[in-house]
Image (cartoon, rainbow, N blue to C red):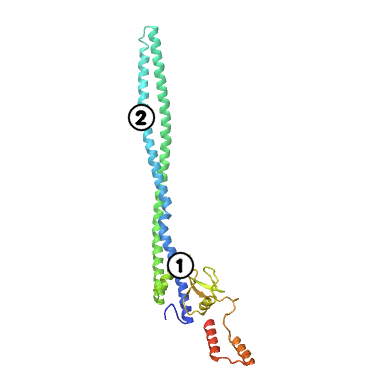
Amino acid sequence: MTIEQGSYRQMTDIFAKLITLQDILVEKYRIKTLINASPQQLQSQDDLLVCLKTEFVEHNTIYGEIREKISKLRTELAEAQIIHECKEKKMDLISTHREYEVLDKEIKETISCEQEARRRLQEEEKKIIDMSEILKREEQLIQNQKSELDVGKNNLAKDIETYKAQLADLKTREQEIVEDMNSGEIISKFERIIINKQNQGIVPLEKNVCNGCYTILPFQFANRVRAGKTVEFCPYCSRILYYKKLDSEKAEYFRAEDINSFMDASNELGEEVDEHDISQKKSNEVDFYE
């Protein structure tokens, strides 16, 4: 017997295996998706760490520039103080009012330069204190983020190992079913259908309706699905169909009591009933309701 055709009981077993295989494949694809997406789980944390490091480098550069300014301003202030002291000493050596006015003006200009240098120095010293605090915070954030990222990578590595173990188990179960069914072409098509049809490769036929694309199917085609002796693919969505009888659904074939009534009615009308036809109807009923 091949997967494409067999007795009702054999095909029922095949459909059950296909449903089991579908569950295995869906789970396998889900785990593979998780593994492929795993690096992205830490991407945001990795990006944040890169951003923090970039900001730290930029702020550290600014910190260095401020230090250079402070060094220059301190030199400038020291020179202004020396000049101021020298001019103050010259005040004792002047002899005329004109010399006094000139020197006094120079002293005032020197004091102004000294004050400006001190003011700018204080501003830069405040900046470097603030920048130092910023660098300390950023350095701590980098350390925390790096530690968190390392923990995340370790946990992710463990998760991936778990996923791989689950995949190995699923692969074994899949292989057992595939080898037992012995039909690579149908299995390959079945796998493609599952991937392309949102994890549904085999669906039930309910009241002549495909439960995958919800299309009403032709009666003759639906009858073949009900018979359950061949593998039938939905002509609209390509999914494999199997018959699922609902409690509220009436049989499409004659029952035994229907055949007896038919015989009685035929006899009353004087018509001959072909025993072969009656036997065939009973056989169909047994196959269908088995």
Residue at x 42%, y 50% (from the top left corner): 45
Residue at the disc numbered 2: 71
264, 61: nearer the viewer: 264
Residue 26 visible to the viewer: no
Q: Which numbered disc flags the more N-terminal residue, 1 or 2?
A: 2
Mark 1: give few (<14), some (14-19) or many (20+) Cα within 10 Å: some
275, 286: nearer the viewer: 275
Residue at disc 2, secondary structure: helix
Give, as a three-letter code, the residue at label 1.
Ile
Give, as a three-letter code, the residue at label 2.
Ser
From the viewer's perspective, is residue 258 above or below residue 95? below
Q: What percent of the width, then of the height, locates residue 39?
A: 40, 56
Residue at the disc numbered 1: 194
State which quarter of the image contains the N terminus.
bottom left
Q: Nearer the viewer, mark 1 or mark 2?
A: 1
Residue 129 visible to the viewer: yes
Residue at x 40%, y 61% (from the top left corner): 160
Q: What percent of the width, then of the height, locates residue 123?
A: 43, 29
- Examine the image and state in which quarter residue 78 appears: top left
Residue at x 43%, y 32% (from the top left corner): 126
Q: What percent of the width, then of the height, locates residue 90?
A: 35, 12
Residue at disc 1, secondary structure: helix
212, 163: nearer the viewer: 212
Circle count: 2
**Distance of label 1 from label 2 (alpha carbons):** 72 Å
Residue at x 63%, y 89% (from the top left corner): 265
From the viewer's perspective, is residue 132 above or below residue 247? above
